[in-house]
Image (cartoon, helix red, strand yellow):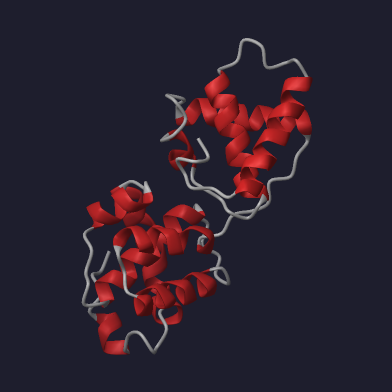
Amino acid sequence: MSDRLSLVATIKDRANEIYKKVEDLKSIRGRNQDAILAACLYIACRQEDRPRTVKEICSVANGATKKEVGRAQMYIVKQLEVEMGTIHAGDFLRRFCSHLGMTNHAVKAAQEAVQKEEELDIRRNPISVAAAVIYMITQLSDEKKLLRDISLATGVAEGTIWNSYKDLYPYASRLIPSSFATEEDLRNLCTP
């Protein structure tokens, strides 16, 4: 699984360690092994500060569903009392922008916007915030992207991206770097 996600050896090793600890508990009998393995990989990615979305993990998890991986992950965290660390929108941003083929200038603006967003009290999933920031940035650039394309690249539903965009829109002038867009450009953003 880790090879299909192009993960580094430290993540593979960490996932193996987690799996061995879970296996030693002998309490995983009867559980979906693919989901357990995927959950170990997910936890290892988070611990090594290289988080992947559950959807990304499931895409290489031999048929384990998001629900099964989520349950397995919660079970492992509870059994082993492991720390996973928090995730931020910036953890996913560069990879998502790369999937969309965005320019370095647009990626830098998106990274600055995500850093500023953390100062605000936007209570949204970091992955959907990253997708909404990308949508906002691409609407201000010459390389506009469709909501559908951003949804495919990020794994976030179009409606979720739109709802996150609605939450971020009032703060656009604070989020978007002035070096990327002028006040007039911001007024031309589509109103949610």
89 above or below 67? below
Q: Quadrant of the C terminus?
A: bottom left
Residue drawn at (36%, 65%), measured in percent from left and top? 134
Q: Nearer the viewer, residue 1 or 38?
A: 1
Residue drawn at (63%, 55%), measured in percent from left and top? 49
Q: Position of residue 41 (x, y in %)?
A: 59, 38
Give the side of residue 11 with respect to residue 146, left or right.
right
Q: Position of residue 158 (x, y in %)?
A: 29, 50
Q: Nearer the viewer, residue 184 or 33?
A: 33
Residue drawn at (58%, 54%), measured in percent from left and top? 50
Q: Position of residue 162 (x, y in %)?
A: 31, 56
148 above or below 98? above
Give the side of residue 8 with respect to residue 13, left or right.
left
Q: Position of residue 37 (x, y in %)?
A: 58, 28
Judge whether residue 39 can be spotted in this image.
yes
Q: How many marks?
A: 0
Judge whether residue 77 can be spotted in this image.
no
Give the side of residue 37 with respect to residue 23, left or right.
left
Residue drawn at (26%, 84%), measured in percent from left and top? 185
